[in-house]
Image (cartoon, rainbow, N blue to C red):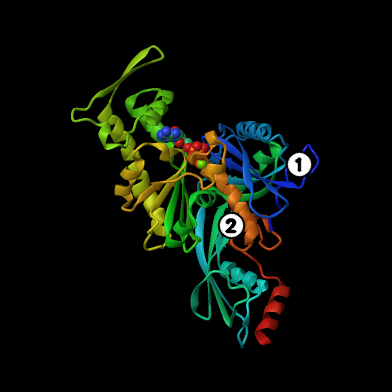
Amino acid sequence: MLSFMKASTSSAYRGSEYLVGLDLGTSKITVVVAEREGSYGEAQIIGIGQAPSTGIRRGQIVNIDQTVRSLRRAIDDAENMVGENLSEATVAFSGANVQSVKTTGMISLGKAPRSVIRFDIDRVIEAAQTDLSVPSGKMILHTIPVEYSLDGTTGIDDPLGMSGMRLNIELMSVIVPVAIIQNVKNCVTRAGLEVSGLVIKPLASALGTLTPEESVVGSAVVDFGGGTCGVSVFFEGRPKHIAVVPVGGDHITNDIALVMKIPTNKAEEIKKDMALFSDSIVPETPNDLEFEYMGRNYTCPLDKLTDVVRCRVEELFSLYVKDEIAASGVASLPGGLIITGGGSKSAGIDQYLAKIVNMPVRVSLPLDSGRMPPSRNGVEYTCASGIIRYVLERERDPLKYIDSSFESENLEIINPTNAQTPHRKKTVLQYVVNLFRELF
Ligand SMILES: Nc1ncnc2c1ncn2[C@@H]1O[C@H](COP(=O)(O)OP(=O)(O)OP(=O)(O)O)[C@@H](O)[C@H]1O
Ligand SMILES: [Mg+2]
Protein backbone atom coordinates (compact mmCIF):
# COMPACT_ATOMS: atom_id res chain seq x y z
CA MET A 1 0.00 0.00 0.00
CA LEU A 2 0.99 3.57 -0.57
CA SER A 3 3.31 4.75 2.14
CA PHE A 4 2.18 8.07 3.50
CA MET A 5 3.97 11.27 2.78
CA LYS A 6 5.73 12.66 5.76
CA ALA A 7 7.20 16.06 5.18
CA SER A 8 10.76 16.04 6.34
CA THR A 9 10.29 18.80 8.85
CA SER A 10 13.20 20.99 9.77
CA SER A 11 11.73 21.12 13.26
CA ALA A 12 11.53 17.83 15.14
CA TYR A 13 8.62 15.52 14.29
CA ARG A 14 5.77 16.86 16.37
CA GLY A 15 3.25 14.08 16.00
CA SER A 16 1.76 15.74 12.91
CA GLU A 17 1.80 14.24 9.49
CA TYR A 18 1.84 16.10 6.22
CA LEU A 19 0.10 14.89 3.10
CA VAL A 20 1.37 16.54 -0.05
CA GLY A 21 -0.34 16.61 -3.45
CA LEU A 22 1.15 18.01 -6.63
CA ASP A 23 -1.00 18.92 -9.64
CA LEU A 24 0.98 19.15 -12.88
CA GLY A 25 -1.22 21.54 -14.83
CA THR A 26 -0.78 23.16 -18.23
CA SER A 27 -1.33 26.68 -16.88
CA LYS A 28 -0.03 26.29 -13.35
CA ILE A 29 1.63 23.82 -11.03
CA THR A 30 -0.03 23.50 -7.65
CA VAL A 31 1.31 21.98 -4.46
CA VAL A 32 -1.23 21.30 -1.74
CA VAL A 33 -0.17 20.51 1.82
CA ALA A 34 -2.53 18.98 4.37
CA GLU A 35 -1.76 18.27 7.99
CA ARG A 36 -3.25 15.89 10.48
CA GLU A 37 -2.57 14.88 14.00
CA GLY A 38 -1.06 11.39 14.12
CA SER A 39 -1.09 9.04 11.18
CA TYR A 40 -4.80 8.42 10.51
CA GLY A 41 -8.06 10.26 10.06
CA GLU A 42 -9.06 13.50 8.43
CA ALA A 43 -6.48 16.00 7.23
CA GLN A 44 -6.74 19.77 7.04
CA ILE A 45 -5.34 21.67 4.04
CA ILE A 46 -2.87 24.17 5.52
CA GLY A 47 -1.20 25.58 2.44
CA ILE A 48 -1.34 25.78 -1.35
CA GLY A 49 1.73 26.78 -3.31
CA GLN A 50 1.72 27.48 -7.01
CA ALA A 51 3.74 28.72 -9.95
CA PRO A 52 3.01 29.31 -13.65
CA SER A 53 3.63 26.15 -15.64
CA THR A 54 5.91 26.62 -18.62
CA GLY A 55 7.03 23.16 -19.72
CA ILE A 56 3.64 21.46 -20.06
CA ARG A 57 1.41 21.46 -23.13
CA ARG A 58 -2.01 19.79 -23.37
CA GLY A 59 -1.39 18.33 -19.94
CA GLN A 60 1.85 16.65 -20.97
CA ILE A 61 5.46 17.51 -20.16
CA VAL A 62 7.18 18.86 -23.27
CA ASN A 63 10.20 20.51 -21.65
CA ILE A 64 11.93 18.88 -18.67
CA ASP A 65 14.06 21.85 -17.56
CA GLN A 66 11.18 24.32 -17.67
CA THR A 67 8.91 21.90 -15.81
CA VAL A 68 11.55 21.32 -13.12
CA ARG A 69 11.94 25.08 -12.67
CA SER A 70 8.18 25.63 -12.40
CA LEU A 71 7.93 22.72 -9.98
CA ARG A 72 10.67 24.09 -7.77
CA ARG A 73 8.97 27.50 -7.63
CA ALA A 74 5.63 25.94 -6.69
CA ILE A 75 7.30 23.76 -4.03
CA ASP A 76 9.17 26.78 -2.60
CA ASP A 77 5.90 28.70 -2.49
CA ALA A 78 4.20 25.88 -0.56
CA GLU A 79 7.16 25.46 1.79
CA ASN A 80 7.17 29.17 2.58
CA MET A 81 3.46 29.06 3.26
CA VAL A 82 3.58 26.11 5.68
CA GLY A 83 7.07 26.76 7.09
CA GLU A 84 8.25 23.20 6.49
CA ASN A 85 10.46 21.38 4.01
CA LEU A 86 8.52 18.91 1.92
CA SER A 87 10.05 15.63 0.89
CA GLU A 88 7.41 13.51 -0.87
CA ALA A 89 4.22 14.02 -2.86
CA THR A 90 1.44 12.19 -4.63
CA VAL A 91 1.45 13.58 -8.15
CA ALA A 92 -1.58 14.15 -10.39
CA PHE A 93 -0.78 14.18 -14.07
CA SER A 94 -2.43 13.63 -17.44
CA GLY A 95 -1.50 13.45 -21.08
CA ALA A 96 -2.65 12.10 -24.40
CA ASN A 97 -3.41 8.40 -24.91
CA VAL A 98 -4.85 7.70 -21.48
CA GLN A 99 -7.26 4.80 -21.78
CA SER A 100 -9.67 3.29 -19.31
CA VAL A 101 -10.47 -0.30 -20.19
CA LYS A 102 -13.16 -2.45 -18.60
CA THR A 103 -12.76 -6.19 -18.16
CA THR A 104 -14.51 -8.87 -16.15
CA GLY A 105 -13.21 -11.83 -14.16
CA MET A 106 -14.62 -14.79 -12.29
CA ILE A 107 -13.25 -17.25 -9.73
CA SER A 108 -14.70 -20.21 -7.91
CA LEU A 109 -14.60 -20.10 -4.12
CA GLY A 110 -15.02 -23.87 -3.78
CA LYS A 111 -17.75 -26.48 -3.85
CA ALA A 112 -19.56 -25.09 -0.80
CA PRO A 113 -20.21 -21.46 0.17
CA ARG A 114 -17.47 -19.78 2.19
CA SER A 115 -16.39 -16.25 3.17
CA VAL A 116 -14.43 -14.16 0.70
CA ILE A 117 -10.94 -13.34 1.94
CA ARG A 118 -8.44 -10.74 0.71
CA PHE A 119 -6.59 -13.37 -1.33
CA ASP A 120 -9.79 -14.06 -3.32
CA ILE A 121 -10.02 -10.38 -4.24
CA ASP A 122 -6.43 -10.50 -5.53
CA ARG A 123 -7.29 -13.63 -7.52
CA VAL A 124 -10.43 -12.23 -9.12
CA ILE A 125 -8.64 -8.99 -10.04
CA GLU A 126 -5.90 -11.09 -11.56
CA ALA A 127 -8.47 -13.14 -13.48
CA ALA A 128 -10.00 -9.93 -14.87
CA GLN A 129 -6.60 -8.69 -16.03
CA THR A 130 -5.27 -11.97 -17.40
CA ASP A 131 -6.49 -11.35 -20.93
CA LEU A 132 -5.96 -7.61 -20.83
CA SER A 133 -3.48 -6.68 -23.52
CA VAL A 134 -1.42 -3.68 -22.62
CA PRO A 135 0.08 -2.17 -25.76
CA SER A 136 3.83 -1.89 -26.02
CA GLY A 137 5.21 1.12 -24.14
CA LYS A 138 2.15 1.41 -21.91
CA MET A 139 1.37 0.28 -18.40
CA ILE A 140 -1.51 0.02 -15.99
CA LEU A 141 -1.58 2.98 -13.61
CA HIS A 142 -4.83 2.36 -11.72
CA THR A 143 -6.71 -0.85 -11.13
CA ILE A 144 -10.22 0.08 -9.98
CA PRO A 145 -12.81 -2.53 -8.97
CA VAL A 146 -16.12 -1.21 -10.35
CA GLU A 147 -18.51 -3.88 -9.14
CA TYR A 148 -18.46 -7.32 -7.58
CA SER A 149 -21.10 -10.03 -7.72
CA LEU A 150 -21.40 -13.16 -5.60
CA ASP A 151 -23.31 -16.16 -6.92
CA GLY A 152 -25.13 -13.90 -9.37
CA THR A 153 -26.07 -11.18 -6.85
CA THR A 154 -24.84 -7.98 -8.47
CA GLY A 155 -24.04 -4.56 -7.02
CA ILE A 156 -21.80 -5.77 -4.21
CA ASP A 157 -19.58 -2.97 -3.04
CA ASP A 158 -17.21 -4.90 -0.79
CA PRO A 159 -17.37 -8.70 -0.86
CA LEU A 160 -14.83 -9.23 1.94
CA GLY A 161 -16.37 -11.51 4.58
CA MET A 162 -19.46 -12.25 2.48
CA SER A 163 -20.25 -15.88 1.62
CA GLY A 164 -20.65 -17.50 -1.75
CA MET A 165 -19.25 -20.01 -4.21
CA ARG A 166 -18.55 -17.79 -7.22
CA LEU A 167 -17.04 -14.30 -7.20
CA ASN A 168 -17.27 -12.05 -10.25
CA ILE A 169 -15.72 -8.64 -10.78
CA GLU A 170 -16.06 -5.78 -13.24
CA LEU A 171 -12.73 -3.98 -13.29
CA MET A 172 -11.47 -0.75 -14.78
CA SER A 173 -7.79 -0.47 -15.66
CA VAL A 174 -6.38 2.95 -16.46
CA ILE A 175 -3.57 2.50 -18.98
CA VAL A 176 -1.01 5.23 -19.67
CA PRO A 177 2.20 5.52 -21.68
CA VAL A 178 5.25 4.49 -19.60
CA ALA A 179 7.18 7.47 -21.00
CA ILE A 180 4.70 9.94 -19.47
CA ILE A 181 5.18 8.37 -16.03
CA GLN A 182 8.94 8.37 -16.44
CA ASN A 183 8.94 12.07 -17.40
CA VAL A 184 6.72 12.93 -14.44
CA LYS A 185 8.92 11.03 -11.98
CA ASN A 186 12.06 12.47 -13.51
CA CYS A 187 10.86 16.08 -13.22
CA VAL A 188 9.47 15.76 -9.69
CA THR A 189 12.60 14.00 -8.45
CA ARG A 190 14.83 16.62 -10.06
CA ALA A 191 12.77 19.31 -8.35
CA GLY A 192 13.63 17.68 -5.02
CA LEU A 193 10.56 15.62 -4.08
CA GLU A 194 10.16 11.88 -3.98
CA VAL A 195 7.08 10.58 -5.81
CA SER A 196 5.12 8.58 -3.27
CA GLY A 197 2.04 8.07 -5.42
CA LEU A 198 0.54 8.86 -8.80
CA VAL A 199 -3.02 9.66 -9.77
CA ILE A 200 -4.57 10.44 -13.10
CA LYS A 201 -5.95 13.99 -12.96
CA PRO A 202 -9.62 13.39 -13.90
CA LEU A 203 -9.89 10.96 -10.98
CA ALA A 204 -8.41 13.47 -8.51
CA SER A 205 -10.70 16.22 -9.89
CA ALA A 206 -13.80 14.07 -9.47
CA LEU A 207 -12.88 13.13 -5.90
CA GLY A 208 -12.16 16.80 -5.25
CA THR A 209 -15.61 18.06 -6.18
CA LEU A 210 -18.24 15.34 -6.50
CA THR A 211 -20.62 14.98 -3.56
CA PRO A 212 -21.26 11.42 -2.33
CA GLU A 213 -24.89 11.69 -3.55
CA GLU A 214 -23.84 12.80 -7.04
CA SER A 215 -21.34 10.00 -7.29
CA VAL A 216 -23.98 7.41 -6.32
CA VAL A 217 -26.86 8.55 -8.56
CA GLY A 218 -24.61 8.98 -11.60
CA SER A 219 -22.79 12.14 -12.70
CA ALA A 220 -20.14 13.23 -15.16
CA VAL A 221 -17.32 15.55 -14.09
CA VAL A 222 -15.33 17.69 -16.51
CA ASP A 223 -12.24 19.52 -15.27
CA PHE A 224 -12.03 22.22 -17.94
CA GLY A 225 -8.38 23.24 -17.61
CA GLY A 226 -5.92 25.20 -19.70
CA GLY A 227 -4.72 22.38 -21.97
CA THR A 228 -7.08 19.52 -21.25
CA CYS A 229 -10.55 18.50 -20.26
CA GLY A 230 -10.39 15.67 -17.75
CA VAL A 231 -13.57 13.61 -17.97
CA SER A 232 -14.82 11.08 -15.46
CA VAL A 233 -18.16 9.37 -15.00
CA PHE A 234 -19.26 8.04 -11.62
CA PHE A 235 -22.16 5.75 -10.82
CA GLU A 236 -22.99 3.88 -7.61
CA GLY A 237 -20.05 5.60 -5.95
CA ARG A 238 -17.47 4.17 -8.37
CA PRO A 239 -15.73 5.57 -11.44
CA LYS A 240 -17.14 4.06 -14.63
CA HIS A 241 -14.95 5.87 -17.11
CA ILE A 242 -11.92 8.16 -17.06
CA ALA A 243 -10.50 10.07 -20.02
CA VAL A 244 -8.33 13.02 -20.93
CA VAL A 245 -9.39 15.17 -23.91
CA PRO A 246 -6.33 17.21 -24.95
CA VAL A 247 -8.28 20.43 -25.52
CA GLY A 248 -8.77 23.19 -22.95
CA GLY A 249 -9.24 26.90 -22.34
CA ASP A 250 -5.95 27.84 -24.00
CA HIS A 251 -7.34 26.65 -27.32
CA ILE A 252 -10.17 29.17 -26.97
CA THR A 253 -7.63 31.92 -26.32
CA ASN A 254 -5.62 30.87 -29.38
CA ASP A 255 -8.78 30.80 -31.54
CA ILE A 256 -9.68 34.34 -30.45
CA ALA A 257 -6.14 35.57 -31.14
CA LEU A 258 -6.06 33.93 -34.54
CA VAL A 259 -9.48 34.89 -35.84
CA MET A 260 -9.46 38.41 -34.39
CA LYS A 261 -5.81 38.90 -35.33
CA ILE A 262 -4.99 40.16 -31.84
CA PRO A 263 -2.13 39.28 -29.46
CA THR A 264 -2.63 36.20 -27.27
CA ASN A 265 -2.36 38.21 -24.01
CA LYS A 266 -5.20 40.45 -25.09
CA ALA A 267 -7.26 37.47 -26.29
CA GLU A 268 -6.85 35.87 -22.85
CA GLU A 269 -7.92 39.11 -21.17
CA ILE A 270 -11.03 39.43 -23.35
CA LYS A 271 -11.95 35.79 -22.74
CA LYS A 272 -11.72 36.21 -18.97
CA ASP A 273 -13.43 39.63 -18.75
CA MET A 274 -16.37 39.17 -21.09
CA ALA A 275 -19.42 37.02 -20.50
CA LEU A 276 -19.04 35.39 -23.92
CA PHE A 277 -21.61 32.68 -23.19
CA SER A 278 -24.25 34.92 -21.75
CA ASP A 279 -27.30 35.60 -23.99
CA SER A 280 -27.15 39.31 -23.23
CA ILE A 281 -23.65 39.76 -24.66
CA VAL A 282 -24.73 40.22 -28.27
CA PRO A 283 -27.19 43.07 -28.57
CA GLU A 284 -29.71 43.38 -31.45
CA THR A 285 -27.23 45.29 -33.57
CA PRO A 286 -23.82 43.76 -32.90
CA ASN A 287 -21.32 46.19 -31.48
CA ASP A 288 -17.64 46.20 -32.12
CA LEU A 289 -15.16 45.79 -29.34
CA GLU A 290 -12.57 48.49 -29.84
CA PHE A 291 -9.34 48.76 -27.92
CA GLU A 292 -5.77 49.93 -28.09
CA TYR A 293 -2.98 47.50 -27.28
CA MET A 294 0.73 48.34 -27.34
CA GLY A 295 0.21 51.39 -29.51
CA ARG A 296 -2.11 49.74 -32.06
CA ASN A 297 -5.87 50.04 -32.47
CA TYR A 298 -7.95 46.89 -32.82
CA THR A 299 -11.61 46.28 -33.68
CA CYS A 300 -13.34 42.98 -32.93
CA PRO A 301 -16.97 42.45 -33.96
CA LEU A 302 -18.72 41.07 -30.86
CA ASP A 303 -20.85 38.55 -32.76
CA LYS A 304 -17.76 37.11 -34.45
CA LEU A 305 -16.00 36.92 -31.09
CA THR A 306 -18.81 35.00 -29.40
CA ASP A 307 -19.14 32.72 -32.45
CA VAL A 308 -15.46 31.73 -32.27
CA VAL A 309 -15.61 30.92 -28.58
CA ARG A 310 -18.96 29.14 -28.65
CA CYS A 311 -18.02 27.05 -31.71
CA ARG A 312 -14.88 25.75 -29.99
CA VAL A 313 -16.74 24.91 -26.78
CA GLU A 314 -19.63 23.33 -28.66
CA GLU A 315 -17.21 21.14 -30.61
CA LEU A 316 -15.33 20.18 -27.45
CA PHE A 317 -18.42 19.16 -25.52
CA SER A 318 -20.73 17.87 -28.27
CA LEU A 319 -18.07 15.74 -29.90
CA TYR A 320 -15.34 14.75 -27.45
CA VAL A 321 -16.86 15.10 -23.98
CA LYS A 322 -20.20 13.56 -25.00
CA ASP A 323 -18.35 10.62 -26.61
CA GLU A 324 -16.39 9.99 -23.43
CA ILE A 325 -19.55 10.16 -21.32
CA ALA A 326 -21.23 7.68 -23.69
CA ALA A 327 -18.20 5.36 -23.44
CA SER A 328 -18.95 4.94 -19.71
CA GLY A 329 -21.98 2.86 -20.62
CA VAL A 330 -24.01 4.57 -17.86
CA ALA A 331 -27.47 5.03 -19.36
CA SER A 332 -28.64 8.02 -17.34
CA LEU A 333 -26.89 10.62 -15.23
CA PRO A 334 -29.42 12.24 -12.87
CA GLY A 335 -26.56 14.11 -11.19
CA GLY A 336 -25.90 15.84 -14.51
CA LEU A 337 -22.63 17.33 -15.70
CA ILE A 338 -20.42 18.94 -13.10
CA ILE A 339 -17.81 21.32 -14.48
CA THR A 340 -14.80 22.65 -12.65
CA GLY A 341 -11.31 23.92 -13.58
CA GLY A 342 -10.36 27.43 -14.78
CA GLY A 343 -12.39 27.09 -18.00
CA SER A 344 -15.61 26.81 -16.01
CA LYS A 345 -15.21 30.41 -14.77
CA SER A 346 -16.72 31.88 -17.96
CA ALA A 347 -20.01 33.52 -16.98
CA GLY A 348 -23.03 31.71 -18.44
CA ILE A 349 -21.09 28.61 -19.56
CA ASP A 350 -23.29 26.29 -17.46
CA GLN A 351 -26.54 27.34 -19.18
CA TYR A 352 -24.85 27.24 -22.57
CA LEU A 353 -23.48 23.73 -21.98
CA ALA A 354 -26.77 22.41 -20.62
CA LYS A 355 -28.28 22.87 -24.09
CA ILE A 356 -25.35 21.09 -25.73
CA VAL A 357 -25.10 18.06 -23.46
CA ASN A 358 -28.83 17.89 -22.76
CA MET A 359 -28.56 17.54 -19.01
CA PRO A 360 -28.28 19.82 -15.99
CA VAL A 361 -24.87 21.49 -15.68
CA ARG A 362 -23.41 22.79 -12.42
CA VAL A 363 -20.15 24.71 -11.95
CA SER A 364 -18.51 23.17 -8.91
CA LEU A 365 -15.91 24.37 -6.42
CA PRO A 366 -13.63 21.99 -4.50
CA LEU A 367 -15.49 20.18 -1.70
CA ASP A 368 -12.79 21.51 0.63
CA SER A 369 -13.10 25.07 -0.67
CA GLY A 370 -14.27 26.44 2.72
CA ARG A 371 -11.13 25.11 4.39
CA MET A 372 -8.65 26.24 1.73
CA PRO A 373 -6.73 29.55 1.63
CA PRO A 374 -9.28 32.17 0.43
CA SER A 375 -7.38 33.25 -2.69
CA ARG A 376 -6.62 29.63 -3.66
CA ASN A 377 -9.89 27.82 -3.18
CA GLY A 378 -11.57 28.30 -6.57
CA VAL A 379 -12.40 25.90 -9.37
CA GLU A 380 -8.76 25.83 -10.57
CA TYR A 381 -7.79 24.04 -7.34
CA THR A 382 -10.27 21.17 -7.51
CA CYS A 383 -7.75 18.66 -8.83
CA ALA A 384 -5.05 19.62 -6.32
CA SER A 385 -7.40 19.32 -3.34
CA GLY A 386 -8.76 16.07 -4.79
CA ILE A 387 -5.29 14.51 -4.54
CA ILE A 388 -5.52 14.69 -0.73
CA ARG A 389 -8.97 13.08 -0.85
CA TYR A 390 -7.58 10.36 -3.12
CA VAL A 391 -4.77 9.64 -0.66
CA LEU A 392 -7.22 9.47 2.26
CA GLU A 393 -9.67 7.24 0.35
CA ARG A 394 -6.88 4.82 -0.46
CA GLU A 395 -5.91 4.72 3.16
CA ARG A 396 -9.52 4.00 4.25
CA ASP A 397 -10.01 1.34 1.58
CA PRO A 398 -6.78 0.13 -0.07
CA LEU A 399 -8.76 -1.95 -2.58
CA LYS A 400 -10.79 0.96 -3.98
CA TYR A 401 -8.06 2.54 -6.11
CA ILE A 402 -5.09 0.26 -6.55
CA ASP A 403 -2.01 2.15 -7.70
CA SER A 404 -0.53 -0.50 -9.95
CA SER A 405 2.58 1.48 -10.72
CA PHE A 406 3.53 1.44 -7.04
CA GLU A 407 2.55 -2.10 -6.27
CA SER A 408 4.86 -3.65 -8.77
CA GLU A 409 5.55 -6.63 -6.56
CA ASN A 410 2.01 -7.71 -7.45
CA LEU A 411 1.68 -6.21 -10.89
CA GLU A 412 4.27 -6.53 -13.56
CA ILE A 413 5.24 -3.31 -15.32
CA ILE A 414 5.21 -4.01 -19.00
CA ASN A 415 8.55 -4.12 -20.70
CA PRO A 416 8.28 -1.40 -23.36
CA THR A 417 9.82 -3.72 -25.93
CA ASN A 418 7.20 -6.45 -25.50
CA ALA A 419 4.31 -5.86 -27.84
CA GLN A 420 0.80 -6.78 -26.67
CA THR A 421 1.98 -8.58 -23.55
CA PRO A 422 -0.70 -10.08 -21.30
CA HIS A 423 -0.75 -8.01 -18.13
CA ARG A 424 0.31 -10.46 -15.45
CA LYS A 425 2.02 -13.78 -15.26
CA LYS A 426 0.69 -16.21 -12.71
CA THR A 427 3.31 -17.69 -10.48
CA VAL A 428 3.53 -21.46 -10.07
CA LEU A 429 2.78 -20.95 -6.38
CA GLN A 430 -0.44 -19.14 -7.16
CA TYR A 431 -1.55 -21.97 -9.45
CA VAL A 432 -0.89 -24.51 -6.69
CA VAL A 433 -2.75 -22.43 -4.11
CA ASN A 434 -5.69 -21.93 -6.46
CA LEU A 435 -5.83 -25.61 -7.26
CA PHE A 436 -5.75 -26.44 -3.56
CA ARG A 437 -8.68 -24.06 -2.97
CA GLU A 438 -10.71 -25.55 -5.82
CA LEU A 439 -10.23 -29.05 -4.47
CA PHE A 440 -10.94 -28.43 -0.78
N1 LIG B 1 -12.50 34.03 -15.76
C1 LIG B 1 -12.17 33.11 -16.66
N2 LIG B 1 -12.97 32.91 -17.74
C2 LIG B 1 -12.65 32.00 -18.67
N3 LIG B 1 -11.56 31.22 -18.64
C3 LIG B 1 -10.73 31.37 -17.58
C4 LIG B 1 -10.99 32.31 -16.54
N4 LIG B 1 -9.98 32.21 -15.63
C5 LIG B 1 -9.14 31.27 -16.09
N5 LIG B 1 -9.57 30.77 -17.26
C6 LIG B 1 -8.92 29.75 -18.09
O1 LIG B 1 -8.72 28.59 -17.34
C7 LIG B 1 -7.60 27.88 -17.88
C8 LIG B 1 -6.70 27.44 -16.74
O2 LIG B 1 -7.42 26.60 -15.91
P1 LIG B 1 -6.70 25.65 -14.85
O3 LIG B 1 -5.89 26.49 -13.93
O4 LIG B 1 -7.74 24.80 -14.25
O5 LIG B 1 -5.74 24.84 -15.81
P2 LIG B 1 -4.59 23.77 -15.49
O6 LIG B 1 -5.05 22.93 -14.35
O7 LIG B 1 -3.29 24.44 -15.29
O8 LIG B 1 -4.51 22.97 -16.84
P3 LIG B 1 -4.79 21.43 -17.22
O9 LIG B 1 -5.54 20.79 -16.09
O10 LIG B 1 -5.58 21.46 -18.50
O11 LIG B 1 -3.46 20.80 -17.45
C9 LIG B 1 -6.90 28.83 -18.85
O12 LIG B 1 -7.21 28.46 -20.18
C10 LIG B 1 -7.54 30.17 -18.51
O13 LIG B 1 -7.59 31.03 -19.63
MG1 LIG C 1 -6.02 21.15 -14.19
With 363 as the anchor, is 109 left or right in this view?
right
**Residue 209 sits above or below residue 373 on the image:** below
| Label 1 CA crowd tier, 10 Å (few <14, some 14–19, many 20+) | some
Query: For mark 1, what is the residue?
Result: 8
Point out the frontmost of discs 1 and 2.
1
The kind of residue tagged 1 is Ser
The answer to whether any part of residue 179 appears in the image is no
The kind of residue tagged 2 is His
Query: For mark 2, what is the residue?
Result: 142
x, y percent for residue 347: 36, 36
**Residue 215 sits above or below residue 97 on the image:** below
* Rendering quarter of residue 249: top left
At numbered mark 1, what does the secondary structure look like: helix, strand or loop? loop
- In the displayed orientation, state which residue is furthest to the right: 12
At numbered mark 2, what does the secondary structure look like: helix, strand or loop? strand
Q: Nearer the viewer, residue 83 or 123?
A: 83
Q: Nearer the viewer, residue 146 or 130?
A: 146
Q: Nearer the viewer, residue 127 or 383?
A: 383
Of the image marks 1 and 2, the number of the one nearer the N terminus: 1
**Residue 314 sits above or below residue 115 on the image:** above
**Residue under the image location 54 percent in, 41 percent down:** 60
x, y percent for residue 273: 38, 28
